[in-house]
Image (spheres, grey):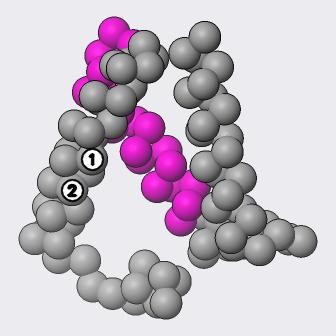
Amino acid sequence: MHRLLYEQAPRTPASTARLRQFEQLLAGEVVFHLSRLGVAGADPALTALLLIQAVEAQIHGVVLEPIDGHTIESSVGAVIEFWTRALAAQAT
């Protein structure tokens, strides 16, 4: 279903704008948590948005093109584990 929607669904300017608004909403929440953990960097809003976009791209990648020998679920889990470890390392 994800592949069908991602590759075949029409993207209108309105739907793209809604997606960007949702990213900004998420970024606001992520800024709070990055700051709480002490890993927000010099520009917390930018850091949060880059984090959201990076995770989104990685999830799209493993869902649309699963890694040989791995399930989508295990690959999504690996993305989550990767970012959790990266953020935890920055917090110490």
Q: Which residues are magenta?
A: 41-60
Q: Secondary structure at mark 1?
A: helix
> Distance from label 2 to label 1 (Cα)?
6 Å
- Which of the pair 37/7 is nearer the observer? 37
Residue with the mark numbered 1:
26
Q: In terms of image quadrants, where is residue 89?
A: top right
Residue closest to the far left: 14
Mark number, residue 70:
none
Q: Residue at x 29, y 29 (%)?
A: 31
Q: Residue at x 46, y 55 (%)?
A: 56
Left or right position of 40 against 43: right
Left or right position of 35 against 18: right
Q: Residue at x 50, y 49 (%)?
A: 55
Q: Is residue 7 visible?
A: no
Residue with the mark numbered 2:
22
Q: Are marks 2 and 1 in contact (CB under 8 Å)?
A: yes
In the rendered image, the vertical position of residue 73 relative to residue 48, given as above or below? below
Question: x%, y% of residue 33?
Answer: 35, 29
- Dot 1, crowdedness within 10 Å: few (<14), some or many (≥20)? some
Question: x%, y% of residue 14?
Answer: 10, 71
Location of the C terminus (image quadrant): top right
Q: Secondary structure at mark 2?
A: helix
